């Protein structure tokens, strides 16, 4: 990461600069008769007052755990009842990190036993935010569909305020922004393309403003075909005939079944192994890039995006 001056902050959206309130207030009396400094965070569940530099943190969102990990912030519990992405193996194999259920089904008793200072929800765990907030201050830090880069920056800068990591957070955001901009020039020059996901033998395409709109909106990929924004989260089902007709120069492929460990599912390479796909420029020019599906589909934080940029850069070189 390169050092970042405070002047760089002017390049960020205003919402990113004010997200965490930027002020610590002496708010709560502690057991010793003193006060606990707090920070007001603009989260998806409103303006939430949380302790400054909380010591015991529980995280129910992989994207947020990715960012916290990048900022070297310790966590006390993650949802590891189900399979944990290999990206977070150090947490899953660490006895000091408690299992607090799953993303969709938190173990509220396990959370309460940790007596956390802060709980972070988001994405797949958003529906549990209200119940988690009954245990401890909880912030829903879901990222905004169609605003990936801005949302990731907002979240990182908020954690910088909460955990007294402002400088580190600014550097992390700067690295993602600068690398996105630099690589975007190459992506734009390389031709048009499509981001597709394979699942149960079918493919769906994503376009600008979608869950994977980052490739178009921020990285500058020109869409090879118009994709409905109504299916922003799940993509628009695309026939192989339509894919062949679109004839993308590049295909960026996410394998959902591999990411979630679906038993007996065909890998993406097999799903796309047919004459119609073979007729596309992407196939003929060896420009089908199979992304790290676990990181893209299940993680999606700043580190995961930086790794994806590495993969794209290597493919374009």
Image (cartoon, rainbow, N blue to C red):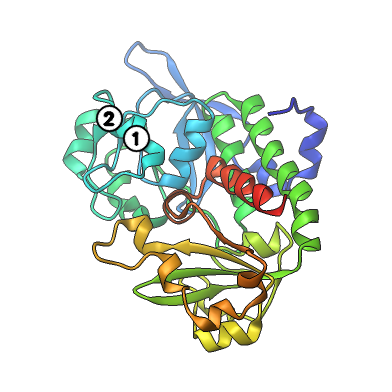
Left-right relation of 56 to 188: left
76 versus 221 height, above or below: above
Residue 261 percent coordinates (x, y): 30, 56
Please say if the residues under marks 2 and 1 sit with CB atoms less than 8 Å apart: yes
> Where the N terminus falls, by quadrant?
top right
Q: Which of the pair 239/132 is nearer the observer?
A: 239
Left-right relation of 172 to 112: right
The Cα–Cα distance between marks 2 and 1, rounded to whole angstroms, is 6 Å
Residue 89 numbered mark, or none? 1
- The residue at which mark 2 appears reads as 93
56 versus 87 height, above or below: above
Q: Is residue 176 visible?
A: yes
Residue 106 numbered mark, or none? none
Q: Is residue 119 visible?
A: no
Q: Residue furthest left?
A: 109
Residue 77: image quadrant is top left
**Residue at horizontal 53 percent and vertical 38 percent from the top:** 40
Q: Which of the pair 61/14 is nearer the observer?
A: 61
Left-right relation of 122 to 153: left
Graded by Cα atoms within 10 Å as few (under 14), some (14 to 19) or many (20 or more), the crowding at tag 1 reads few
- The local secondary structure at tag 1 comes to helix
| Badge count | 2
Residue 16 percent coordinates (x, y): 66, 45
Residue 302 percent coordinates (x, y): 57, 43
- The local secondary structure at tag 2 comes to loop
Left-right relation of 75 to 249: left
Residue 303 percent coordinates (x, y): 55, 40
Q: Residue furthest top?
A: 32
Graded by Cα atoms within 10 Å as few (under 14), some (14 to 19) or many (20 or more), the crowding at tag 2 reads few
Residue 168: image quadrant is top right
């Amino acid at each position: 990461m390169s050092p970042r001056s405070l002047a760089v902050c002017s390049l960020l959206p205003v919402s990113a600069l004010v997200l965490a309130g930027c002020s610590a207030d002496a708010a709560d009396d502690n057991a010793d008769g003193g006060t606990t400094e707090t920070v007001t965070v603009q989260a998806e569940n409103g303006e939430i007052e949380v302790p400054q530099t909380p010591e015991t943190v529980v995280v129910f969102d992989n994207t947020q755990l990715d960012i916290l990990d990048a900022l070297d912030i310790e966590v006390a519990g993650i949802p590891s009842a189900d399979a944990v992405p290999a990206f977070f193996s150090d947490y899953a194999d660490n006895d000091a990190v408690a299992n607090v259920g799953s993303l969709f089904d938190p173990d509220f008793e396990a959370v309460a036993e940790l007596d956390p200072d802060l709980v972070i929800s988001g994405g797949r765990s958003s529906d549990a935010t209200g119940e988690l907030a009954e245990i401890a201050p909880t912030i829903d830090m879901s990222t905004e569909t169609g605003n990936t880069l801005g949302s990731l920056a907002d979240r990182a800068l908020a954690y910088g305020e909460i955990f007294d990591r402002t400088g580190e957070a600014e550097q992390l955001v700067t690295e993602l922004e600068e690398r996105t901009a630099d690589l975007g020039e190459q992506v734009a020059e390389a031709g048009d393309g499509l981001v597709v996901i394979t699942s149960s033998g079918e493919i769906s395409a994503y376009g600008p403003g979608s869950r994977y709109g980052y490739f178009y909106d921020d990285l500058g990929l020109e869409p090879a075909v118009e994709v409905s924004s109504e299916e922003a989260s799940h993509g628009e089902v695309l026939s192989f005939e339509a894919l062949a007709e679109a004839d993308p120069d590049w295909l960026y492929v996410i394998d959902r079944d591999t990411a979630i460990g679906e038993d007996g599912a065909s890998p993406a390479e097999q799903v796309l192994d047919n004459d119609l796909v073979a007729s596309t420029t992407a196939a003929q020019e060896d420009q089908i890039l199979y992304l790290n599906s676990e990181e893209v589909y299940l993680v999606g934080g700043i580190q995961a995006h930086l790794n994806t940029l590495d993969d794209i850069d290597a493919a374009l070189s």
